[in-house]
Image (spheres, rainbow, N blue to C red):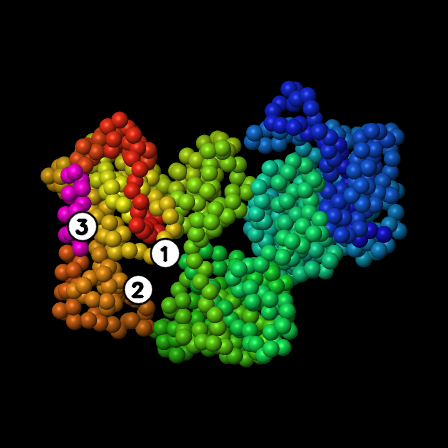
Amino acid sequence: MPELITIGETMVAMVPEDVGMLRYKRNLNIRIAGAESNVAMGVRKLGHTAGWISRLGKDEFGELILREIQSEGVDCSKVIWDEEHPTGLMVKQMETDATKVFYYRKGSAASHMKPNDIEESYFENCKIFHITGITPVLSQSCKDTIIKSIEFARKKNVLVSFDPNIRKKLWKNQDYAPFFKQILFESDIVEMGVEEGQCLLGVSRKEDMISILQQNNPNVIVAIKDGGNGAYIYHKKEYYFIPPYPCKCVESIGAGDAFNAGFLSGILSNCNLEICGKMGGIAGAMVTEVVGDVENQPDIEKMENCLKEKKEELEEIVDFLANPGRYTDVGARIPKGIILVGPPGTGKTLLAKAVAGEAGVPFFSLSGSDFVEMFVGVGASRVRDMFAEAKKNAPCIVFIDEIDAVARKRGSGLGGGHDEREQTLNQMLVEMDGFGVNEGIIVMAATNRVDILDPAILRPGRFDRKVTVGRPDVRGREEILEVHAKGKPLGDDVDLKKIARTTVGFTGADLENLLNESAIVCAKEGRKFIEQEDISKSFIKIGIGKEKKSKIISEKDQKITAYHEAGHAILFHVLPDVGPVHMVSIIPTGSGAAGYTMPLPERDETFMTKGKMKQDIIASLGGRIAESLIFDDITTGASQDIKQATSTAKAMVTKYGFSENVGMINYADEDEVFIGRDFGRTSRDYSEDVAKTIDNEVKAIIDDAYAQAKSILEEHMDVLHKCAKLLLEKERIDREEFEALFEPDGVVLEKKEAVSEEVDVEPDSL
């Protein structure tokens, strides 16, 4: 008897070879398509026995379907031949923006399935009975058949798996909603899309969906599928995020069925729930790489190869959790804690979940703020409860996000030693010391403020290791863009490699936001494909703010802005270590700027050089100098430029040792006052003489930069006038238009090679 049984209609699919209207097509490929049989074939490819129940018309199409499904090793002994009704047929029309499907299934053989078609004995040794929401809406007899099948499954202690798989063309009203909800609440395994959850449960948050399902069945296993954004797996207190598996999507039809097949195969193999989710994600991604529902479903070998991929970071931690004996036999002590440090949005939380998934161990996730309450002792109690639960489930990973909320330096509060945060921290220190060596509990934490953490928690034996999760390099950005581009139709002019090169300093969250904003721009303009222009607009919106074209600006102010931004742009172009210029505009933005000049670093560099910082200052002063040269007057518009130039010059002198007179001594102030530690500081840590020397050096740097910037602009006065004139005409010009101004015949000059450049995603603005 099969390990998995499924029931439902499979049709013949007629698919054209290319895009276009069906009436012009002369060649159609014949395939089969059925959500339930797709799952059965996928499970069979992954090494498990599967059976499929249905009715087929006694015709050529029926013979084709049976032969194809049987050839994959699926048991079809319970398929009934129907001599009175035909096999269902569907025809696909491949369009540029979507795939349109025409169904010819009314009165089909499968729609005449009856409860008497089902044999109770067939469920004898079955482990999972999988159904979808398609079959019960075909007819009343199909609905009755599903009800009868579930009864048989319950009698035989078979797990019921349900995918709503709502089809709007079949589900013309809400009559089936109560029935679907009943199945949802009674099923042991639920696989549903986010939109299906919203439709049936009336909530949009995934957490609310799982809460409703668990209220009705505390033991339910839930997989919430979110297309190209990944999937979310829930079971009791276990929660896992399954990131999307990298793939080149050709057609998304069949991805959900393939996910179900991989996920259920993992359950049949008694895999960790995280691994089950990963198997589903891999299978779903692979199917989308070809046209067809089942043509690229993975077999056992492909799945194992994908699951063998290791995370580069924390590999030994993963190995210890999976094979602890290898380390304990040689007397090794595995670190008790790992702290992930890095800017916001770099993927610290995802990395921790990935480690747990690779190791196949339970994953407990909390936020530092979960421990903080106004009532003294509550936080400490929650720490004790958390570690008590972890010990019961060892080996496991405990992950605390934003740990700086609870683990700040003691004495930093204004409430003395009895501060609630301090008591919570003290309890955490005690608990981390309390569980034994190699007990199998590893505490992982994430923060972007490691400088304010208490030293006691960072010592060996607590958080032994610090792993830096930095901003991605160009290759990392490209891979991240490919992940977030899934499910977003990109135009032919969109080049992800080029975007990766021009987004220096962007985190994973920044890149996701960039593509999301681009999709919003595309949708607002009523188009089906995201164009490069959409991405450019989003880039400006993220970096500067949304342009306000409706704002009324006087001609005088427009002219001042045009020369101001032209001054910046010329310097960005001429200086070798800054730029190149991506965009120049005199359109006001949401940030309050009257215009902007956007440079665009094209390479990742590790270090900032003295020459690069000096050129940054020169470029910052270009706007003010252009105003003074043209109008014999100056405005307040350069205030931010002056602030930026002063900050850079001060850092050169006090932080980086770039001044011979000051020397290689750090006189830089702390980035921010830490109340409790710095509250009593009222003076500098250096003398007045040193302060005077610093001020003089900063002024000298600014003055020298001013003189160089003025000289360059005077040398390129013709370009300054041409650029300002063009800006007044067009309001915004791109790189090619700007660089053409340097040659009378419009030939774009190649910019000389830069020595070094630093990450700088913030554009210069007026």
Q: Amino acid at mark 2?
A: Glu
Task: Find disc 2 in the rendering and name its residue.
Answer: 672
CA distance separating discs 1 and 3:
24 Å
Q: What residue appears at the point 52 percent right and 67 percent down from the top-left corner?
A: 444
Q: Position of residue 687 (x, y in %)?
A: 16, 71
The circle on residue 360 is none
Q: Position of residue 330 (x, y in %)?
A: 60, 77
View extreme (top): residue? 24
Q: What is the crowding at mark 1: few (fewer than 14 residues within 10 Å), some, or many (at least 20)?
A: few
Q: Which mark is residue 705?
A: 3
Confirm whether the magenta stretch covers residue 548.
no
- Is residue 705 a member of the stretch shown in magenta? yes
- Magenta extent: 701-715
Q: Nearer the viewer, residue 436 or 389?
A: 436
> Looking at the image, which residue is at 80% across and 41% down?
71
In front here: 387 or 314? 314
Side of 171 relative to 666 (left or right) = right
List the single residue furthest toward the left.
632
Rounded to the nearest angstrom, the CA distance separating label 3 from label 2 is 28 Å
